[in-house]
Amino acid sequence: MSDENTKQKVEELDWSNLGFKYRNLPYSYHEEFKDGKWQNGGLTTESTLTVSEAAEDLHYGQEVFEGLKAYRRKDGGINLFRPDMNAKRLANSAKRLLMEPYPEDKFVEAVKAVVKANQEFVPPYGTGGSLYIRPFMIGTQPVVGVAPSEEYQFHIYATPVGAYIKGLNPMPYVVSDYDRAAYGGTGQAKTAGNYASSLLPSILAKKAGFADCLYLDPREHKYVDEFGGANFYGITKDGQFVTPKSNSILPSITKKSLLEIAEQLGLNPKETQIEADQLDELSEAGAMGTAAVISPVGSLTYKGKKHVFFSETKAGPVTKKLYEALVEIQLGDRPAPKGWVQEVDVTQVK
Ligand SMILES: *Cc1c(COP(=O)(O)O)cnc(C)c1O
């Protein structure tokens, strides 16, 4: 199956208006697991996957994925932000779903190969854009009864994206009555099923005029858990960075990084239970994830009452500081803690 005609042409892109949508780039990465081992994978121009009608993932949801970005530096080079953490998390997600983990060192090399092959699609420095990279893995064995697949496809595509939400604009959120993941369920795995279950609550929130919804812990509906695709943080009135401790949230790499930055900024960061009834104790709040880095929470509506944090229109001072620190590290404008930034070798063009 050829999709030559639908490939994105670089000269047709408007770098400052990319939005967040799929574009079919020249190169992807593909590798298959069968007969008990990963076969030799590599770059491919094929962007369509072929699976059996009885493939495991289509019926029983054996799918895990990752999301990371490549950033253009001021000097024209290209940075990846902690891709080793994505490698580890994909392997952990795979283990939870009883899938064959993809080797972590090969993961990082595969990501670099995709970025290098599509390097002209990494948006210029200063546009706010980046190359979004989506590695994923599916169970492909034909099955009728429920059993883990013994065959897998690992695939990576990349697509240029704009700043998810331009600038640090606070958004209104609402606490959902629904859960995205069960207590003891798959909340800590980055898997399609968690997203499928978040579609309805998210659409209901949007129809009611909110940017998205926030989930509470699924066992007691008492503590803040996270958003559908981003972790939650708050800044207490006395300046402490707090973020939920829960076994049903996805361990965000942005969160992990901001915890370390908060430590350096003297914010005494803590992972702890945050009671939804105690929002008054927070002077700022935000959503953390690769897509937007930080999206400030302007207000949170809970039990019919709207709680405003710093301001509904302006990001708070601590949020701004955290955001600037992390973005500058990702772009190479500020020294990064050891191992956080990996350069993509773009010297030899293919
Ligand atoms: C991917 C994801 C996040 C954000 O993780 P990052 O590593 O920071 O991008 C947060 N919550 C959920 C549910 C996610 O799937």
Image (spheres, grey):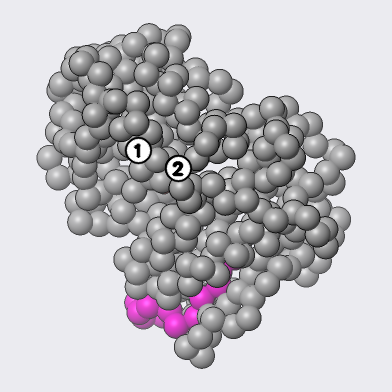
At which x and y percent is residue 117?
Answer: 75, 58
**Magenta: main secondary structure:** loop
Helix or strand or loop: what does disc 1 sit on? helix
Of 253 and 132, the residue lying toward us: 253
Marks 2/1 in contact by CB < 8 Å: the verdict is yes
Q: Is residue 211 placed above or below 195 in the rendered structure?
A: above
Q: Return the residue at label 2.
A: 337
For the magenta stretch, what is the residue range?
A: 142-155
Amino acid tagged 2: Pro
Instruction: Give the residue displayed 74% in from the left and 54% down from the top.
Output: 346
At which x and y percent is residue 252?
Answer: 38, 45
Helix or strand or loop: what does disc 2 sit on? loop
Instruction: Give the residue displayed 52% in from the left and 36% down from the top.
Output: 335
Label 2 – label 1 distance at C-alpha: 9 Å
Horizontal relation, residue 256 to residue 307: left or right:
right
At which x and y percent is residue 47?
Answer: 71, 62
Between tags 2 and 1, which lies in front? 2
Q: Return the residue at label 1.
A: 260
Quadrant housing the C terminus: bottom right
Horizontal relation, residue 39 to residue 82: left or right:
right
Of 338 and 326, the residue lying toward us: 338
Q: Is residue 215 placed above or below 309 in the rendered structure?
A: below
